[in-house]
Amino acid sequence: MLSIDPESKSNEFYIKVRKSMIKFESDDWTLYVVNHSRPIPLSLNNQVIRLLSDLGNSNGVFESIQTRCIDRKEFWHPPAKCYLNPLDSVDQSVINENQQKYKNAKNFLIRNKIPLPVNEARCLFGIADETGTLKPGECFIQYRSLENSSTSEKYIVPTGTVLVTKNPCLHPGDIRKLKAVYVPKLQSCIRDGIVFSSNGHRPSFNEMTGADLGGYQYWAYWDDEFQIEEVVKPLFYSLAKKNLDTAPGIIANTHSVIADKHSDGTLSKECEECALLFARAIDARKTGENINLTSIMRLIGKYCQIYPEWMMKFGTPKMDPPSMSINEILHRKAQDA
């Protein structure tokens, strides 16, 4: 991750690199840019919906947001210019293709991918506060306003409560309740990003599925429709050891079924077991750990003979009577839209 140093002077045009970032010596000084910060709209998904529901948000909140989306589809989509990534081809077909992904709203809604208003939530690249200004539990956000009527770029710094997580997320403790604050020295150099505090015994970003700041994007919501009164303690995700293979998809699907069927939802011990193992499975994509699925196979045998309809497991038996979860309610409502 590259960011502008708030302490740098106007004549300092060079990149500062930590020793830990030097993986090997090389004479090649070419800089490749893989991605960059820009306005990225945010959506709900089945995992976030389930976690927010188990954290006390009523079904009515989700249904209200979905209804507004169904009634006013154009309200949820930013202007065409925002779909263009300067790193992509500037061919009009690229813009048209990306626009089509958002125009096909019903297909997204059936899968419970419910767009959130673009000026109330964003997907943001995360970096650490190198100035040491932010206190534990604080963050700084600055985003570009996407008002359709605006002809000029306007950047906004939200303050107050913000809910932040990193997808995929399986445990209620993965959603953190932070305080967004205004920091003048960060305002001049951070746009369309979130800055996390570097103070405290454990950084906030690590509390979200054990994430780091190696190019991850974070789910950030600063409006007030979703509330978390009682924050769940985050899990401690241990590092994976090197080995061979992994199966995050199997673990995630098992977690979804258990969360739907268990009376305690994602707060159940079984879901916590899946969440801990899932974090290792995701990490193993880099480290190569061979995940032991014995415990997951036991849970599959107990819970996964029949699937809720919202999971769209075609060719498998469906629950009868159907699931009463918020995921199922939203899925059926989208089908009837």
Image: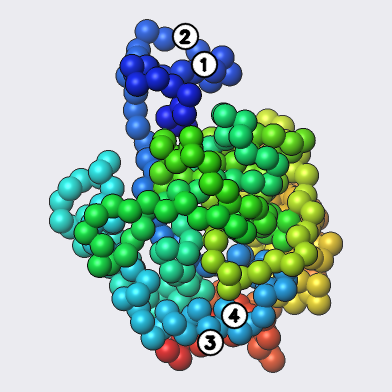
Crowdedness near tag 3: few (<14), some (14–19) or many (≥20) residues, C-alpha within 10 Å: some
Q: CA distance from mark 4 to mark 1?
A: 47 Å
Q: Please say whether residue 159 is visible from this viewpoint.
A: yes
Q: Are marks 2 and 3 in contact (CB under 8 Å)?
A: no
Q: Are marks 1 and 2 in contact (CB under 8 Å)?
A: yes
Compared across the picture, whether 40 is left or right of 276 comes to: left
In the rendered image, residue 257, in percent from the top left (x then y), is placed at 69, 71
In the rendered image, residue 135, in percent from the top left (x then y), is placed at 68, 40
Name the residue furthest left. 91
Compared across the picture, whether 102 is left or right of 194 comes to: left
Q: Which quadrant does the C terminus fall into?
A: bottom left
Which secondary structure, mark 1?
loop
Which secondary structure, mark 4?
helix
Q: Earlier in the sequence, mark 1 or mark 3?
A: 1
| Residue where numbered disc 2 is placed | 25
Q: Earlier in the sequence, mark 4 or mark 1?
A: 1
In the rendered image, residue 119, in percent from the top left (x then y), is placed at 42, 63
Q: CA distance from mark 1 to mark 2?
A: 7 Å
| Residue where numbered disc 3 is placed | 332
In the rendered image, residue 227, in percent from the top left (x then y), is placed at 66, 69
Q: Nearer the viewer, mark 4 or mark 1?
A: 4
Q: CA distance from mark 3 to mark 4?
A: 16 Å
Q: Residue 173 got which mark?
A: none
